[in-house]
Image: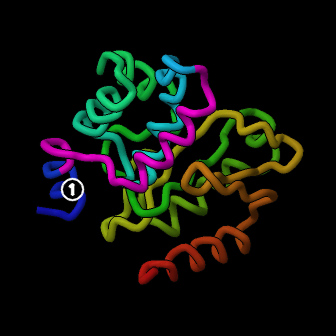
Amino acid sequence: MSALNAARSEASTSYQLSSQARQRIDREIAKYPQGRQQSAVLAALAIAQDELGWLPSAVMEEVAAYLQMAPVAVYEVATFYHMFRLAPVGRHTITVCTNLPCALSGASAAARRLQQKLGVEFGQTTADGCFTLVEGECMGACGDAPVLLVNNKQMHSFMDEAKIDALLDSLAAEKGK
């Protein structure tokens, strides 16, 4: 069984937020009036995903219980926003903006370079579990095209072949960290 399948199997049957995750969620809940903890659902899902890397059903149910909301409501949020992953992904998720402004500024070439270097297509994860390649929508940085988003947190602009190669080398070197 691959590491990704093992993670999928284990996480989908049991999950409990760590005390650090609960503390972070509590800080988010505190931003809203008392009794409105459900307003922190986006932040809570992001925190849970940061901890596990993706959001299996058990994670969404734990978040729902913690926020005192229906599990289906949490699922609706998780499936609406593209930054949430409902299946295991690589340690690094690279999202390529392929909307028109990026496409006109080299996004297709950047995507081809990533696919060639990683040996995967959009929606796939490398065999070593290091990278998942995702096709994305507008990231609001049209003037910096083509842009890549790493792990939904770090944007990289003006990505040519040399910058893509350097980024992949840098991320691959983080394996031991």
- Residue 86 lies, with reference to residue 167, above or below; the image says above
The kind of residue on which mark 1 rests is: Ala
Badge 1 local density, few (<14 within 10 Å), some, or many (20+)? some
Whether residue 141 sits left or right of residue 39 in the image: it is: right
Q: In the rendered image, which residue does mark 1 sit on? A: 7
Whole-percent x, y for residue 49 in the image = 41, 47
Q: Which residue is drawn at 20% across and 48% down?
A: 11
Toward the front, the furthest residue is: 34
Residue 63 sits in quarter: top left
Whether residue 12 sits left or right of residue 19 in the image: it is: left
Q: What stretch is highlighted in magenta?
A: 11-33
- The residue lying toward the viewer, choosing from 172 and 27, is 27
Q: How many labels does the image show?
A: 1
Q: What secondary structure is the stretch in magenta mostly built from?
A: helix
Q: Does the magenta stretch include residue 23?
A: yes
- The residue lying toward the viewer, choosing from 4 and 68, is 68
Residue 143 sits in quarter: top right
Q: Which residue is drawn at 73% across and 59% down?
A: 156
Q: Residue at x 51, y 82 (%)?
A: 173
- The residue lying toward the viewer, choosing from 166 and 21, is 21
Whole-percent x, y for residue 126 in the image = 37, 63
Whole-percent x, y for residue 46 in the image = 49, 42
Quadrant where the image shows the N terminus? bottom left
